[in-house]
Structures are given as structure tokens and as C-alpha cells.
């Protein structure tokens, strides 16, 4: 697309070519690519315990591959000239204020999670975090949110702490489960 350049007489005298590659999208794609390379290089510095089949490098490898693949796709589209459509407007209420009480509850839940990990174990602390955040964001049945949080945190605890050998403390209530895995 060429934009006319108006001279002193008000007539179009020359045209200036529009930028071929959008700089912002190109910078974003290159930053994603750099982050993917950084993550992939970092995977090889992780110490893997001897005898562990699914060690602590599996998840970072998946994340690195997803980052590199996404960066390559965005870079390919940007260099081919495919551009995102300009958004017509935002779907927000410009008069809405920040709900500082909700933010304070969530920050408090994070602090409580950090303090409770060593006392009650990772899974119960994560369940408390999940439940408080769900309640803070308006969950009607807060007890269900705590239950779902406990189930999800136990699954994560078993997969990452038990099967992959990552150091997630079981805590006094679930110490017996740690011996099984």
C-alpha cells in the first residue's frame, strides 16, 4: 500500500511505500524464538537423577518445543506478509474500577500458600490456594472449589513429586502417600 505525499500545492507528488514487515510483530516473533532457544539450552543444564525414566527435563522440553514452533509459525506468517486484523474496540467497561479487595485476597492466598507448603505439604497448600482464589473471583460453591483444588493438586503431586522425582513436600497428612511413590 502506498501513501501519497502531498506537496505545497496540495497535490500528490510522490508515494512512500508502507513498511513491508510490521516491526512489532517481527520483534515479538524473534523474542519468542530467543526465549525458546534459551529454554531449550536451559534444559540441558538440569541435573537428572540416575535411574529416573521420566525426569525433570520432560516438561521443559515440551515447553521449549511449543515456544520454538509458535515462534517459527508467527515468524513465517510475518515474513509472508500476513497481518493480524486491527481490533475495532475493546470489550471492557472504561468506567470500571480496580477491585483491590479481590487482589488483596489473591495475594494473601499466595502468601498463605508459600507459608503452608512446609507445614501441611504442597498438595493441601495448593488446594487452599485454589479454593481461596476461586472464592475471591466469585465462585458460588466455595467448598466445591476446595475439593477440585485438592483433587488437582493431588494429581500434580503424584505426577511431578512421585513419578518424576521433583521435590514437592508431601506434608504430615500425606507422608504415607509419598512412600508409595
Image (cartoon, rainbow, N blue to C red):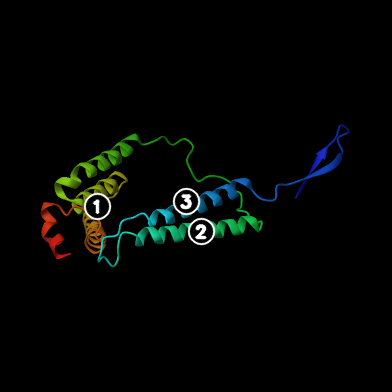
Camera sees residue 87:
no
Q: Earlier in the sequence, mark 2 or mark 3?
A: 3
Query: Does 152 sit above or below residue 24?
Result: below
Mark seen at residue 141: 1
Question: Mark 3 Cα within 10 Å, few/some/many (few <14, many 20+)?
Answer: some
- Name the mark nearer the viewer: 2 or 3: 3
- Indicate the position of residue 54 as horizontal and vertical percent values: 30, 65
Residue at 34% in and 60% down: 57
Determine the image quadrant of residue 155.
bottom left
Tell me the residue that label 2 is attached to: 70
**Marks 2,3: beta carbons within 8 A:** no
- Name the mark nearer the viewer: 3 or 1: 3
Camera sees residue 101:
yes
**Marks 3,1: beta carbons within 8 A:** no
How far apart are labels 1 and 2 at the CA level?
A: 37 Å
Helix, strand or loop at mark 3: helix
Q: Furthest-top residue in view?
A: 8
- Indicate the position of residue 21 as horizontal and vertical percent values: 66, 50
- Name the mark nearer the viewer: 1 or 2: 2
Query: Does 157 sit above or below residue 104?
Result: below
Tell me the residue that label 3 is attached to: 35
Question: Mark 2 Cα within 10 Å, few/some/many (few <14, many 20+)?
Answer: some
Question: Mark 1 Cα within 10 Å, few/some/many (few <14, many 20+)?
Answer: few
Amino acid at each position: 500500500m502506498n501513501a501519497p505525499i502531498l506537496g505545497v500545492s496540495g497535490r500528490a507528488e510522490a508515494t512512500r511505500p508502507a513498511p513491508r514487515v510490521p516491526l512489532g510483530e517481527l520483534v515479538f516473533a524473534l523474542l519468542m524464538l530467543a526465549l525458546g532457544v534459551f529454554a531449550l539450552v536451559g534444559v540441558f543444564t538440569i541435573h537428572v537423577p540416575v535411574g529416573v525414566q521420566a525426569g525433570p527435563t520432560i516438561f521443559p522440553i515440551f515447553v521449549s518445543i511449543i515456544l520454538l514452533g509458535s515462534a517459527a509459525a508467527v515468524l513465517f506468517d510475518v515474513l509472508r506478509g500476513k497481518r493480524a486484523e486491527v481490533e475495532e474496540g475493546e470489550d471492557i467497561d472504561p468506567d470500571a474500577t480496580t477491585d483491590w479487595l479481590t487482589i488483596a485476597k489473591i495475594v494473601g492466598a499466595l502468601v498463605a500458600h508459600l507459608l503452608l507448603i512446609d507445614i501441611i505439604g504442597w498438595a493441601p497448600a495448593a488446594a487452599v490456594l485454589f479454593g481461596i482464589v476461586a472464592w475471591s473471583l466469585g465462585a458460588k460453591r466455595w467448598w466445591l472449589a476446595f475439593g477440585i483444588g485438592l483433587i488437582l493438586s493431588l494429581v500434580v503431586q503424584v505426577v511431578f513429586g512421585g513419578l518424576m522425582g521433583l521435590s514437592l513436600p508431601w506434608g504430615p497428612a500425606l507422608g504415607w502417600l509419598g512412600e508409595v511413590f
